[in-house]
Amino acid sequence: MGRLASTEQECVERSAAEPMLDRVQAWAAVNSGSRNLAGLADMAGLLADAFSALPGELSLVDPAPVDAIDRAGRTVAIDHGRNVHLKVRPKAPVQLLFTGHMDTVFDVDHPFQATSWLEDGVLGGPGVADMKGGIAVMLAALKAIEAGDAADLGYEIVLNSDEEVGSPGSAALIAEAARGKRAALTYEPAALPDGTLAGARPGSGNFSFVVRGRSAHAGRNPEDGRNAIVAAADLALRLERGKRPQLSVNPARVDGGGPNNVVPDLAVLHVNLRPASPEDQTAARSLIESSVATVAAEHDVAICAHGGFGRPPKPMTPQSEALFELVKQAGADLGQQIGWQPSGGVCDGNNIAACGVPVVDTMGVRGGKIHSAEEYLIVDSLRERAALSALAILRLVGGRA
């Protein structure tokens, strides 16, 4: 273990003394699936109460309007929960951003609703790792910082309600909060159970293609019809053939169709594309435009594309590498071996990096099997990661980047 300054050691010890496990268990008992608005409101209230221990101006921010395409090809409004937003010392010389999400992937009727001890030191439960454990770590670190001399540190916190569905209602809030920040820390769980951080990430775009053809009798006059299902299938195949090592394409679902004796006049194709770089995202847009134009012309159908790249690609930059090195050194001085590797997943870190702010987006707990009913948290990592955050923040403020 490296040598810590006395103020650093005191701050690390304060962070470890916070009742993080109690908070995780209480928060995990509240279902906050991304579509459970009542549960998200309860969760936002609990988080607002907990984070009111920090100074500054705390508010609950309504989500931006969001729409989506339903199975009938109609544009419908989608509601999301409110977001917790805290501003602390906006005039301080060092400005940082901290983000996390209160929503989980488990709906209110999902059978995975309670925590349980899987073995000594390993807690299972919905959201314990992704990311109610991470939010507990963030709060513990910041409370420890605030108990010392924090006059030079200003920061914003965004705890959003819709990260698991792409942050459509909170992306603008995060972008505004990122403005002018020196660096950001996001509290997704570690990329691997050993604590490895996620480095570069691809972007992600979700698209719905509404294909409108012409109905006709499948036996009497099929030639008068324009089969929307066939056109949607052709579009899916063309997009899939456009994938390459730096661009994944996943046609995920087709809605539409009807009786066997009717040429279907409506289909809705849902596709996810993940470009590795901004150049690959540009290529993906070209692939979409050319494929839609070709299929529409060849099948004599109308195609309307809805959606976009809500998560821009997040390549490693010199600034992000410098921030990773600072976190790595903080870990070494705490006796923690910290590494990082590329990840195929996406998160709010993508959006923050796109604002030109270096970010480490896996500062949360060690655990695993997230997004499944076997999700777990390694309890010792609460203290480890709180100490890591506290020390990294102190060094960012102290100019040791």
Image (tube, rainbow, N blue to C red):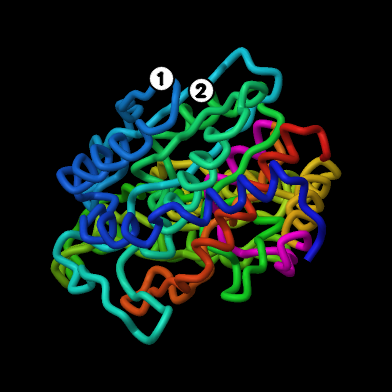
- Amino acid carrying label 2: it is Val
Q: Secondary structure at mark 2?
A: strand
Q: Secondary structure at mark 1?
A: strand
Q: Nearer the viewer, residue 72 or 154?
A: 154
Q: Nearer the viewer, residue 240 or 187?
A: 187
Residue found at x 17% / y 59%: 108
Q: Is residue 379 on the magenta stretch? A: no
Residue found at x 38% / y 33%: 53
What percent of the width, then of the height, locates residue 271? 46, 57
Q: Residue furthest right?
A: 318
- Amino acid carrying label 1: it is Glu
**Residue position for label 1:** 57
**Residue position for label 2:** 88
- Asked which quadrant contains residue 232, the reply is bottom left
C-alpha separation, residue under disc 1 versus residue under disc 2: 7 Å
Pointer 1 or 2: first along the chain: 1
Decide if residue 228 is in sight here: no
Q: Is residue 335 on the magenta stretch? A: yes
